[in-house]
Image: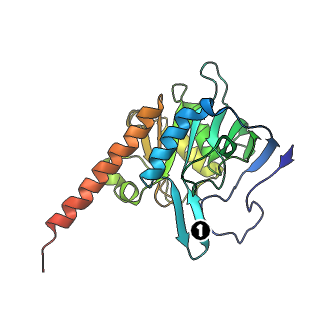
Amino acid sequence: MGILGDDEDDLSAPEREGVTKFGLRYTRSAPLMAARLATLQAWRRILFDLGLIGQEITQAGPFGYGNVSERFDAQGPSGRFLITATQTGHKPVLTPKDYCLVTGWDLAANRIDAEGPAPPSSESLTHAIFYASLADVHYVFHGHSPEIWSRADALGLPSTDRRVSYGTPEMAREVQALLTLPDCRATGLLVMGGHENGVISFATTADAAGEVLIQALARARGFTAMIKTDRPSG
């Protein structure tokens, strides 16, 4: 067992996804069977094809974004969940070696415990809040959508504080606070105000978590199309 983290101690590291900001107690272990990951794999590919998961090229270099997770134990109080491994956003298709099992977490200590063939996503602490806060949530999908993010108010979507960065205990607490609101729970989708383009859906089934993202994307693009149509020509 070891303490690992991507650029964890590099204070000059750019503010970008894939930089782990929590303490990680990680044990390398064998991957799960592909059949156990089939549902996550299917929806992760759909979100990749829609551009909600992928890679951006910036002046600081390429970086991947987006991740998906699934509650590991269908019954009982366990907070264990499967999540895509860190630095996998650029891959069109994942393998079982690209998933990790989060076995425990501590918000106060800013720590994640995990095991698997690769370390977990840098957003693992945020995902953990959903599973700890809502017993009926079994899937959490995090993607990037400039359309949804920039039109959160028009879409009536709840948002975390714009001053709070991704992958931090403060972001996890922001999400925790939003999940106490009935409207947020009913919507099944929230915007990460301080994480540009970041959106998260959550639901009991993978289909529901994916569909709420797709519906929001369609509505956001509809708003954009209306604005372009209304603009005067010439």
Locate residue 184: give its quadrant: top left
In the rendered image, residue 85, in percent from the top left (x then y), is placed at 66, 47
The quadrant holding residue 31 is: top right
- Comparing 97 with 174, the one in front is 97
Instruction: Name the image quarter holding the C terminus.
Output: bottom left
Instruction: Quadrant for the N terminus, please.
Output: top right
190 is higher (above) or lower (below) than 79 = below
Q: Is residue 200 visible?
A: no
* Colour option used: rainbow
The residue furthest bottom is: 234
Where's residue 36, x and y in %? 62, 29
Position of residue 152 measured from the top left corner of the image (x, y, whole percent): 36, 53
Residue at disc 1, secondary structure: strand
Location of residue 75 with respect to 140 vertically, above or below: above
Which of the pair 42/234 is nearer the observer?
A: 42
Instruction: Identify which residue is drawn at 56% across, 32% down.
Output: 133
Identify the amino acid type marked 1: Pro
Would you say 229 lies left or right of 216 here?
left
- Is 91 left or right of 106, judged from the image as shown? left
- Judge by depth and name the residue closer to the eye, 88 or 232: 88
Q: Is residue 112 visible?
A: yes
Residue 22, given in percent of the width and then of the height, sits at: 72, 51
In screen coordinates, is 95 left or right of 46? right
Considering only vertical position in the picture, is 77 above or below 20?
above
The quadrant where residue 210 appears? top left
Q: Is residue 151 left or right of residue 68?
A: left
Residue extending furthest toward the right: 1
Q: Residues within 10 Å of mark 1 (few under 14, many from 20)?
A: few
Circle 1 sits on which residue?
62
